[in-house]
Amino acid sequence: MKIWIETYFNSPIGQLVCLSDEAALFRLDFADAVALETVRADENCQIKAGQTQISRQLEKELTAYFDGESFDFTVPYYLTGTPFQNAVWQAVSQIPFGNRSTYQYIAKRLNKPKASRAVGSANAKNQLAIIIPCHRLVRADGKLANYAGGLWRKEWLLAHEEALFMKNEGK
């Protein structure tokens, strides 16, 4: 049975919870938006409180992100989705900091131009909030779509990144 270590972090947009082991990060979620009992059952794992080298690295990287000092996440992670979900998450990971993309664009990048809804469904199962920047995806009309952490967090993350992007572009 897998054992994941549960670690909590405070952030400007609420408490985050990560599940990791000493090798990689498994999940990063908003603490008020995840049911760890469901994760435990779905993954057939034990969850224990504590810290790992991975969670300590993640905490440093998240602090740098929220402080506007760095936007690169280098923490190793596991992805446990279907091949299609993993392809979507990989494509979403390529959306540059400070930019937005659409579900339709990601579907086209995956050579599945009619799969916008499937991209949205895969995105909803993203297990690594912020790191796989699903908050950068918007509808084709530019409006914000659902976000597991709540639309207010999506708005905050986009505004945070866009402000820092503009600030850094001006240098």
Image: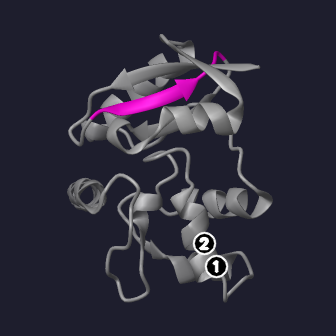
Earlier sequence position, callout 2 versus callout 1? 1
The amino acid type of the residue labelled 2 equals Val
Query: Which one is in front, 72 or 24?
Result: 24
The image quadrant of residue 146 is bottom left
- Identify the coloring: one colour
Task: Say which residue label 2 marks.
Answer: 119
Mark 1, secondary structure of its residue = helix
Within the magenta stretch, is there residue 23? no
Return the x and y of residue 86 as percentages of the image width and height.
70, 56
Q: Residue at x 50, y 33 (%)?
A: 36
Mark 2, secondary structure of its residue = helix
Q: Is residue 98 left or right of residue 163?
A: right
Mark 2 vs mark 1: in front: 2
Residue 99 visible in the shown view: yes
Q: Residue at x 23, y 58 (%)?
A: 152
The image quadrant of residue 137 is bottom left
Q: Are marks 2 and 1 in contact (CB under 8 Å)?
A: yes
Return the x and y of residue 131 as percentages of the image width and height.
49, 45
Work out which quarter of the rendered image holds the N terminus and state it: top right
What number is the disc on residue 121?
none
- Report crowding for label 1: few under 14, some 14 to 19, many 20 or more residues within 10 A (C-alpha): many
Return the x and y of residue 64 as percentages of the image width and height.
33, 32
Q: Residue at x 25, y 62 (%)?
A: 155
Q: Is residue 126 above or below residue 147?
A: above
Return the x and y of residue 21 as percentages of the image width and height.
63, 19
The amino acid type of the residue labelled 1 equals Ala
Q: CA distance from mark 2 to mark 1?
A: 6 Å
Q: Is residue 164 above or below residue 51?
A: below
Task: Say which residue label 1 marks.
Answer: 107
Magenta residues, start to end: 15-22
